[in-house]
Amino acid sequence: MRNFTNLIAVFLFSSFCCQMVLGQTANFGSDLTYTCIGTVQFDDLSSNAPTSWLWQFGDGGLSTQQNPTYTYANSGVYTVSLQTSNAQGMDTVIKTAYVTVEKAKVTSITNAETCINTTATLAATNGTGTLRWYDGSNTLVNTGNTFTTPALTTNTTYFVEDVTTTSVTDYAGPVNGVTVGSGGYHGGNFTGGVNFTAAQGFEILSVWVDADGGGPRTIYLYDGHIADGGNVTNTILSQVTVNIPDGPSRVQLNLQVPGAGDYSLAGNQMDLYRNNNGSAVYPYSLAGVLDMVSATTTSNGFYYYFYNWELSLASECVSARESVEAKVVNADFASVISGGTASFTDASLGATSWMWDFGDGTMSTQQNPMHTYTTTNGPHYVTLTVNGICSFSDSVTVSVGIERLGNDMTLNIAPNPTQGYTTLSFSQELPEDLRVELMSMDGRVVLETILTAGTTSQTLNVNNLTPALYLMRLSTNEIIEVRKIVVGQ
């Protein structure tokens, strides 16, 4: 019998010992598992009174506090573990993919160049949020991944930020009727409720009520405040019919308050508890969200039906702003002609690359090139394109002429101005026939002749021409030269 008693004692001791060891059970919770800010409050929920804690937050961060607050630096999905211990042993709990962090961030930007007096399209990328664009005056100008500017005349800087939105739950109003004061059940043909002013949009998820008998009730969200529940003319924005049990309960409403403004949450023939002893003290406020300002009655100090409002609020996480530049580019140039050579000077705005088309089939990428024309005087239409986007064109006329017919041949025209005759004198005999055309400034040919090879001088009779400025064009198959001649009175 003694042996059997000892065996029972050993068994009981072993069971008690093992229960103490196995009773060391690690567990934890947190105030949230999704965040765009990155800060999470962790709570130790372990049993058997641990005396030490080792938290691993999944990003390399550690803590030995019992209830640490931890801030994640980067977006990601994190596995969190907690190891607890005391004199009876230790235990570890691992919660895989427990915390999701989605921080707002502008991940890339794309600047843009545009020609003067035209628009530019700027671009940016982000994570899961919405991009918002602002001008230099901090005015919101667009939302989305791109923004097209107005027509610009100068370089202009804009700013873009990423905004992610999540929902948080908060509560407003008295916890229940007892916290306000005495009252009783109220029904009858009267629209009782609470007038409130919203500072933003939100959803009324649920409210606490105390019903005098179970059954369906219809609850309304009205536009504006109700001055007298016995005479309601307000517009109904939304409504919900809920089956409310007898006695105290929390009922689901899911009524959406659309935005800032005045509203009323009320119902008729509700048979719900109200405060009617004048003890309600308005406003009942949730900072930045709403102010409950009065009951739907002309009596002071009443509070009707709906206590401890559970609200779903949109919470924004906003990234740092990034600057994005719209650069204005304008192509322009000037030219100086010397004989058959044109010297071009870039006068562009914001140019970093240049492409010249000299109008005779040749090109250059220099900023300020010189170009010698070898055929005809033109006009040659020269085009400058800068940064591959903006172009400017102008015509140039060069002297590719008489000196090419002989060994540095020269031409003298005298008298010039003239009243009747003028003589063309060449320093050498013409090696080939030369066409001479006298043209008015509107392009009409008013005199034409051919000087044959071997000619050294030729007199032209301009007596019959109207006094004016004329252009004398000298040409062969290889050259064209233009001179000016003035015919006077």
Image (spheres, grey):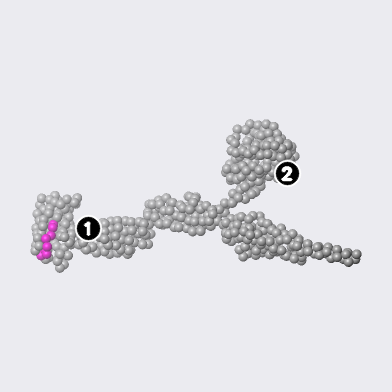
Q: Residue at x 80, y 64 (%)?
A: 17
First of labels 1, 2 by sequence position: 2
**Looking at the image, which residue is at 26% across and 59% down?**
359
Say which of marks 1 and 2 sits in front: 1
> Callout 1 environment at 10 Å: few (<14), some (14 to 19), or many (20+)?
some
In this orientation, does residue 180 appear?
no
Numbered circle sitting on residue 179: 2
Q: Position of residue 393 (x, y in %)?
A: 29, 56
Residues rendered magenta in the picture: 429-436
Question: Can I make out residue 342 in this image?
Answer: yes
355 displayed left or right of 339:
right
The circle drawn on residue 378 is: 1
Figure check: 446 above or below 369? above
What residue is shown at x 75% (from left), y 65% (from top)?
Answer: 89
Classify residue 82 as left or right of residue 412. right
Q: Residue 252, position in %: x, y? A: 66, 43
Main SS of the magenta segment?
Answer: loop
Q: Does the magenta-highlighted stretch encompass residue 268? A: no
